[in-house]
Amino acid sequence: MLTVSLKSQSLSEWFDVKEVADKVWLIDDHNAVNIYLIEGKDSALIIDTGMGAADLSSLVKKLTNKPVIVVNTHGHPDHVGANYQFEKVYVHPADSTATRMLNLIESRKQSGEMMLAGAVPPEGELYKDKELITKLIPVKEGYKFKLGGRTIQVIETPAHTAGSICLLDIENKLFFTGDNNNDLVWLFLEGCLPLSVYLKSLEKQALLISEYNIIFPGHGEKIKSEFVLDEVECVKSILNGTCKSKPYKSFAGEAKICSYGKAKVAYDPNNL
């Protein structure tokens, strides 16, 4: 695959961009989160917008000249931060309030300080002086983004947040899953649904496993589809008490953690 060379030194210092499948670009937002750009014959789809500290909109224009559609997998700050750089964004209604609140100037600033360790893009601290004017458009199960020769279908997967969704590239068997299928999934945050709900979302993905070959998560490298089966067993082991959990600490709080195969889940034992 091709690695894109950017003429703008400031953008190239902030974002790392590489083509990870045919007409699919992974935009690494300063080692904080994955953003994806999928191009069809008629239009392109941006999946998540990252931290919002740097000029994502200008970067996207360097990668494609097609009209751009933007969708959020969920309403956490590292996935909706650059929404303000686009006129409209699709988001599940259950996460629309969080998406709007977390895209306010002060919220973006706080998120940037926490997750970017004070790093600031060379072109300026965009999140400090840009207010949200983006129109949020509700999107639910089964909705299809038709890009021209490429259809991206919405799959609802609530748990990490109530409005979490995944995006299935039907023709190419690619699955873009936000924070639902990272190698380590956080289910201990405020607003996370019970672990039993997460199991239902995973089992739903498992039933669709013949429809995708590769998972592109919100954090980390691409994963083979069979990873979902490890996640299912990991969650089952927590719920049936067979997993020997360990303490887990992060900047977002403390939890318990269990693993099975390649899957790891950090969870709140009071929210099963």
Image (cartoon, rainbow, N blue to C red):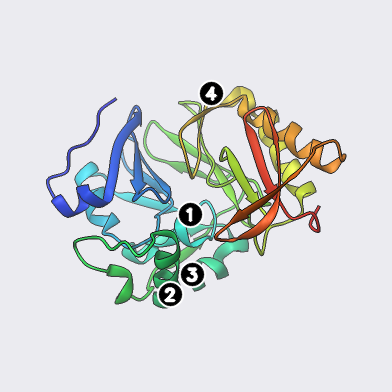
Residue depicted at 69% across the width and 36% down the height: 259
Of 63 and 17, which appears nearest the observer?
Answer: 17
Amino acid type assigned to the residue bearing label 4 in the image: Asn
Image height of 177 relative to 2, above or below: below
Whichever of labels 1 and 2 marks the residue nearer the N terminus, that label is 1
Residue at mark 4 to residue at mark 2: CA–CA distance: 37 Å
From where the camera sits, is residue 64 visible?
no
Q: Which mark is residue 72?
A: 1
Mark 2 crowd level (few <14, some 14–19, many ≥20, 10 Å Cα) = many
**What x and y, as percent, mark residue 88?**
39, 62
State if disc 4 and disc 1 touch (CB < 8 Å). no
- Badge 1 element: loop
Say few, some or many: other residues with alpha carbon within 10 Å of mark 4 (under 14 / 14 to 19 / 20 or more). Answer: some
The residue type indicated by label 2 comes to: Leu
- For the residue pair 90 and 196, the one nearer the viewer reads as 196
CA gap, disc 4 and disc 3 = 33 Å
Is label 3 in a helix, a strand or a loop?
helix
Mark 1 vs mark 2: give the one in front: 2
- Residue that carries the numbered disc 4 in the rendered image: 213
The vertical placement of 131 against 5, above or below, is: below
Residue 102, label in figure: 3
Name the residue at 33% across, 70% down: 127
Tell me the SS state at disc 2. Answer: loop
Per the image, the residue denoted by label 2 is 104
Instruction: Kindly indicate whether the residue at mark 3 contacts the one at mark 2 (C-beta within 8 angstroms).
Output: yes
